[in-house]
Amino acid sequence: MAFRRGPYCLLAALLLSQLNAGLAAAGPGDIAVYWGRNKDEGTLREACDTGAYTTVLIAFLSAFGHGTYTLDLSGHPVAGVGDDIKHCQSKGVLVLLSIGGQGGEYSLPSSQAASDLAEYLWNAFLAGGRAGVSRPFGDAQVNGVDFFIDQGATEHYDELARFLYAYNRFYRAGGITLTATPRCSYPDQRLQGALATGLIGRIHVRLYGDLQCTWSARESWEKWAAAYPGSRVFVGVVASPEADKDAYMSQKDLYYNVLQFAQKLPNYGGLMIWNRYYDKINNYISSSQTSDLAHFSI
């Protein structure tokens, strides 16, 4: 039912401007989004050109650990992605490759498997380049690797993090960004070892998924933030009820239930959005100013 303009509308606008000022003062942090899960989401270049995101996570390298590597971009043509990566990076957008996901064929059965995967990622997607190793994105280099581990054994991801981090010695500036995207229930056994290394600079806590949070979304996120004070911890949400109707939070609920508290913590990093397709169809994140709450319905 449509509301008529009147005193209540003016009051809502006043409250909204106050909320906007509060969030802008705190800063929304970085906005990360997963891309590569639906061919109707548009190209990687189009995602970066929205101006909404500071990080794009390409999803997924969905098979590894047994001598076979599969890049699954849900029907997106791989040709051209390399140029799009360079375009995004030229606009200051960080581009990471996410490994794992749901429904893939992956695990790390041994230390050797972890070493082999690190070497493959270095030569196929990072700054390496060994004869005989195909580079799906050509000479484009992703900025780092995201651990999105939802299945398989829990061992050896700590070793993978160390092997990847060791390649930083080949960089004159910058280096390999390592992130992890755990389920909200703390701790996440599959990522606990990797996080314990202290080499994971960013943690995207999924406040959604098949297993709902043990506590409220805010309490679950705060447990992660308290456990890893040296990492930047992100609030991970779905951008549409189509993605997870039970976990979906409207922009209003996200702010009031989680963000207004999370932003006060020193290691709050920003938002992680699942995913570009759902964000595109639901217009969850503003394409102009993510700190502007004018697009957050109240």
Image (spheres, rainbow, N blue to C red):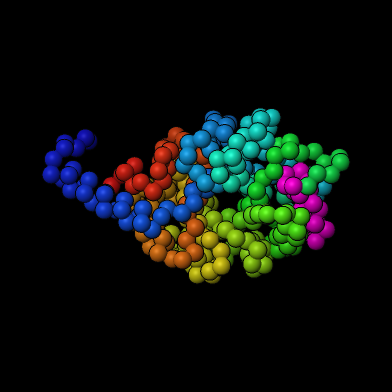
For the point 73% across and 41% down, the residue is 70
In the picture provided, is 75 more to the left or to the right than 5?
right
Q: Which residue is at the far right?
A: 131
Q: Quadrant of the N terminus?
A: top left
- Where residue 282 sits: x, y (%)? 42, 37
- Where residue 275 sits: x, y (%)? 52, 42
Residue 73 magenta-drawn? no
Residue closer to the observer: 36 or 210:
36
For the point 28% across and 47% down, the residue is 298
Q: Quadrant of residue 161?
A: bottom right
Report whether residue 260 is seen: yes
Total marks in image = 0
In the picture provided, is 143 more to the left or to the right than 245?
right
What secondary structure is the magenta-colored segment mainly? helix
For the point 41% across and 39% down, the residue is 288
Q: Which region is colored magenta?
A: 110-127
Q: Quadrant of residue 79?
A: top right
Classify 109 as above or below 48: below
Residue closer to the observer: 144 or 239:
144
Residue 126 magenta-drawn? yes
For the point 34% across and 47% down, the residue is 293
- Where residue 213 sits: x, y (%)? 48, 59
Classify 165 as above or below 73: below
In the picture provided, is 104 more to the left or to the right than 229?
right
Q: Which residue is at the far left?
A: 7
Q: Which residue is at the far front?
A: 172
Report whether residue 184 is seen: no
Classify 279 as above or below 202: above
- Where residue 30 sits: x, y (%)? 49, 51
Residue closer to the observer: 269 or 192:
269
